[in-house]
Each structure stands twice: as C-alpha cells, then as structure tokens.
Image: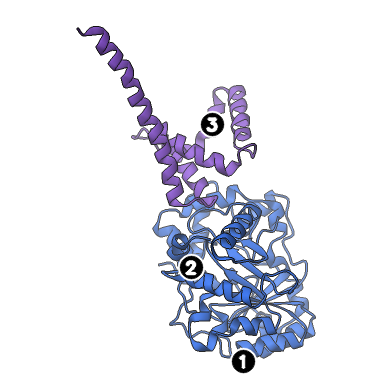
Chain colours: A blue, B purple
Amino acid sequence: MVSDTDSQLKALDEITRISKQVPYFMDKLALSGINNFNPVGLEIFQVNFGKLCNQACKHCHVNAGPSHTEIMDRRTMEYCLEAVNKHNIPVVDITGGAPEMNPNFRWFVKECRKLDKRVIVRCNLTIFFSGDEYNDLPVFFAENRVEVVASLPFYSADRTDRVRGKGVFDASVRGLQMLNANGYGRNGTGLVLNLVYNPSGAFLSAPQKQLEEEFKRELYKGYGIVFNNLYTMTNMPVSRFLDYLMRSDNYVAYIENLVNAFNPVAAMGAMCLNMISVNWDGYLYDCDFNQMLDLKVSQNRNNHISNFDAEFILNRNVKVSQHCYGCTAGAGSSCGGSTA
Amino acid sequence: MEKTYYNAEDLKKFADIGDYQKEMADKFFDWYGEVFNDGALSGKEKGLIALAVAHVVQCPYCIDAYTTDCLRNGYSEQQMMEAVHVGAAIKGGAILAHSVQMMNKVKNLTL
C-alpha cells in the first residue's frame, strides 16, 4: 500500500516518466499560458479536525477511520480562531475524518459563529447514528446556522454501499431526512444543505448540473429528500484512492484521462488560490490533499497556525504535483464543486 | 508489432487514422462528435445506445469507452446489462428471423 507520503510523491513523480502524455503539472500550466499560479485571496479557512471517523471509505484521501487518534486539540483551535478573527477570513470550512467526533467540535463551531463567520461542516451523515451523543447534531447545526455539506457517493444503495460500506446508504437517507426535518434544504429557511458526489471508481464525473438534476429527482421521488446544490468532486490520486488505482492497474490511464481533460479555466479557479488548509496538528497546507502528501506551505516557521502570517500566506507559492490534475480536469473540482 | 489483434493501447491511436486519409478522417470525427451531442436524445442516452451497439458489433475498444461513459453518466450496472440484452435480443432475433428464409427454402425444395 502506498500510504506513506514519500511513496505517494514518488509515484506521482514517476508517472511523468511512465507516460509521455503526462507532463509535470507546472509544465502543463506553463504550456497553457499560466505562469503565475499564486493565491488571489484568502476567503476560505479549512480546518481538518483529524483522522478519527466512524467510517473507513475506500476512496478516502485522509485515510481516516475509527481507530485513529490524531485529532486537533483545543489550543490549536484557539490559534485558528485568532487567525480568522484577526485577518477577517469570512468562511470556516470544517472537515475530517468525522469532525463531529472531536470533543471540542461544538465549542469551536459556536466560537466561529460568535465571530459571525460562515461555517461549513463536511458531514458524512452516518455520524448521527454512531452514538447517542451525535443524535441531536441536526438540531445543533440548525441552531448555529451551520452550512452542511454532506457526502453521498450516489443516489442508489448498491453503488453508495460499495464505496462507503454496507448499510451506509440507508443511514445517509435517514440522516438527510433528519436534516430536512430541521429545515435544511427547504425554501425560506436559509439552512443550506449541499451534497457531494464523487465517482465510485476510476472515472471522471458527469457534468455537475446533469447529476444535480438526477440526484434531486431520484432522492425526492424515492425518499422525499430535498437539498440545495450538488458538488461534483474528482477522486484525487492520493492516499487510499491512489493505492486502489495502482492495485487495479488503472493508475496510468486515470492520470492520462485527467491530463487530457486539463482545463486552464478550471486551473485558474482552483480552490488552493483562495484558501488555506490547517491540519489537525496545526501545520498549514494549500489544500486538504497537500496535507495527505505532507506538502506544507513552507519549511519555515510560517508553516504553523501558531505563527500565522496572512501576508506570507497571500504571497506564497502554491505547492503542486501531478495530483493537482484532479482539480483541473474538465469543469474542475474543488470542495465547492466545479470551478469552470 | 503487437502479437495480439486487439490492444487497449491502440484506442489512443484512433485519431491516427487521419495519417493515411486526413480529409475523410476529419469528416468522420466531426460527424462522430455531432452524433453524440445532445439533441432529440440526450448525449447520456446516446451513450447507452452506443454501449449496446458496441456489444452487437463486438468492438472491444467501444465496449471499454462506452462502459466508462455510462458509469460516468450514472447508469447502474443493471441498466447497462439490460441495454446489452436489448442488443443481444435484436441480434438473436435477427438470426431466428432469418430462419424463415431457411424454412421457405426447405418447403420449396422438399416434396
């Protein structure tokens, strides 16, 4: 398994030698006339609360699971709050693992809301049923006006369960119904419920709008579920999914597909140009995927939340490798869906 | 030279057919692209038809390409297999329908 960062980076480097169709990502940018791939702003502050999760999905780039102990402590969260407050960063995007399992999760959300930040929580839905202490999360979310981004690989049980485990689809449906019952996704409430789709294998997503229409039709017809937007995300060739690609002999063809679908417009809308990503241990990255490859924003003291320097962050060079083709293929891919 | 008649890598060379007859190849690829655009049928529906036809004409390249296309477009495995059955039914039915010709000939030739 290519789980350690060195093996992953080596595999991403070697692909340029294995396939003539895969240039280095930076070279591809330059060939497309993009010579300046630097931040344009800092609107999104993404916080990864750690690898602890109630699920262990096959495609998970975080390699998260129930046995992990790496979670963000309260002091690191305090540094995060100081940073978003001091530098007027409007959006706090909380992810994991299952971030709700962090004992300081609710405190952090409330503190962000006190600062009047837009708070996004990336929720796997099944967490609501993973213990009594999580049953009231939909109520907590609604009370704190949290924007929920929920993962749902597909609108059918077989394909969802194949990726996320047996019974996950049924639990996800119940979770979405609980969110709907608390006003999420319903007109006039202002409570936003967005779903995230990622392909259940080594292929790219259909257009976001087409899939959104199908998800809305099928989930309403089958289960009475409503939601606001569907975000399509490309499976990134890192961590568990990279391992799957290599084991299934799909690695080269998959990266070639990403390269052939390279879209410079999607590249210019890449999320890394407008965000910073904080790992559970406080280190700073350009995105959640760079976290998994341990590509920190720098090797100096500015790479930790305890020394957060917005000026440095805005003027940094974004760290890229061949996994970045995942965000620039077709209509693009980001934590907020398509970018082009 | 490959030692097999079919090689998955050859699919990437499809565009090279223009090397020997560019004008016709250009016309073919333009037309091909147009066929699969959304029209009275959606591009998604056309992909499922293409999957069935790919099986009928037994083109391994087309089967690879349109299996991927159908997965990408959200078709379930059951839907894809039903489409293949439609192709098989037409192919099988065509064979059996031709047996009428055999029966006609038998009747013509026998006392």
Q: Chain of mark 2?
A: A
Q: Residue at (26%, 11%) from the top-left corner?
A: B107
| A121 versus A230 height, above or below | below
| B99 versus A265 height, above or below | above
| A129 versus A252 height, above or below | below
Name the residue beneath numbered marker 3: B16
Badge number at residue A74: 1
Marks 1 and 2: which is nearer the front? 2
Q: Residue at (57%, 62%) from the top-left corner?
A: A219
Left of A12 or right of it: where is A148?
right
Splitting the image into 4 quarters, where does residue A181 fall? bottom right
Q: Amino acid at mark 3?
A: Asp
Q: Chain of mark 3?
A: B
Name the residue beneath numbered marker 2: A169
- For the N terminus of chain A, the image quarter is bottom left
Q: Amino acid at mark 2?
A: Phe
| A252 versus B66 height, above or below | below
Splitting the image into 4 quarters, where does residue B64 fall? top left
